[in-house]
Image: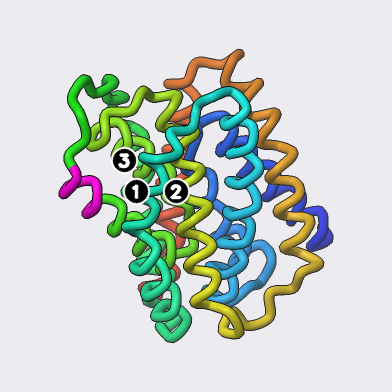
Amino acid sequence: MSVLILALAAGAVVGLALGALGGGGSVLAVPALIYLMGFTPAAATTASLIIVTVTSATGLVAHARDGNVAWRTGTLFAAAGVVPAFVSGAAAAHLAQGVLIGAFAVLAALAALRMLRPPAPDAPHGARPGKAAAAGAGLGAVTGFLGVGGGFLTVPALVGVLGLRMRQAVGTSLLVISVNSLAALAARTGTGGDLRWEVVGPFAAAAVLAAWDGRRLAAKVSGGTLQRTFAFVLLAVAGFMLTDALA
């Protein structure tokens, strides 16, 4: 199978997951780029940031049109993560490949376990500035370090810490992810290795298009079923990557 077909197929899976679940799909982008398309871990995390930025920004437009973005809250939350995303993005480019793969495997496992938990109800309380800043900084660091959007962490934080409604949290998370991803990309300029745009471009395009199908899929299939299925796939990917890192 050609690399182009693999890139289109992997991008479609990532986009479907992002569109259907509102987060988590980008966790599959890095292992797909490493194991299916032969990217180094450093190049894969940089390429993933590009894919995440494009896909999130496109989704943000759709959610903004529907009125599901809390611009002020999202901007403040994202601002707390800009510096951590920049710093961790620069540091990640200099780490050993085994360390990056191992860290990513742990993150994928945590994402899967988070998805297997029952969804949290909308929080009735108001925002807590200190916790919001800490959560925003932590999410920015994760985005910069591992090249993922962190939607599976951002959405619960926006609901539990800032008290947003779930639908609004999903839309606002795309604003946060877009800002943090751009900051991390700025830090990695010139350090991402061979990004192979002939792969990254089709991958990102397929993800953007499939995200629209993912939104329609979410309306037809139980959200719990989708989330559990994706969580088990992530656990398998995490196990494979951890075994590879320790080998």
The residue type indicated by label 3 comes to Leu
Comes first in the chain, label 1 or label 3: 1
**Distance CA(mark 3)–CA(mark 2):** 22 Å
State the quadrant of the C terminus: bottom left
Q: Is residue 245 left or right of residue 135?
A: right
Q: Is residue 79 left or right of residue 237?
A: left
Q: Main secondary structure of the magenta part?
A: helix
Q: Name the image quarter holding residue 19.
A: top right
> At 54% from the left edge and 63% from the top edge, which residue is drawn?
182
The residue tagged 1 is: 77
Residues at badges 1 and 3 in contact (C-beta under 8 Å)? no
Q: Of tags 3 and 2, which is closer to the observer?
A: 2
Q: Position of residue 67 (x, y in %)?
A: 54, 24
Identify whether 98 is placed above or below 183: below
**Distance CA(mark 1)–CA(mark 2):** 7 Å
Secondary element type, mark 2: helix
Instruction: Estimate how packed mark 2 is, as few (under 14), some (14 to 19) or many (20 or more) residues with alpha carbons within 10 Å.
Output: many
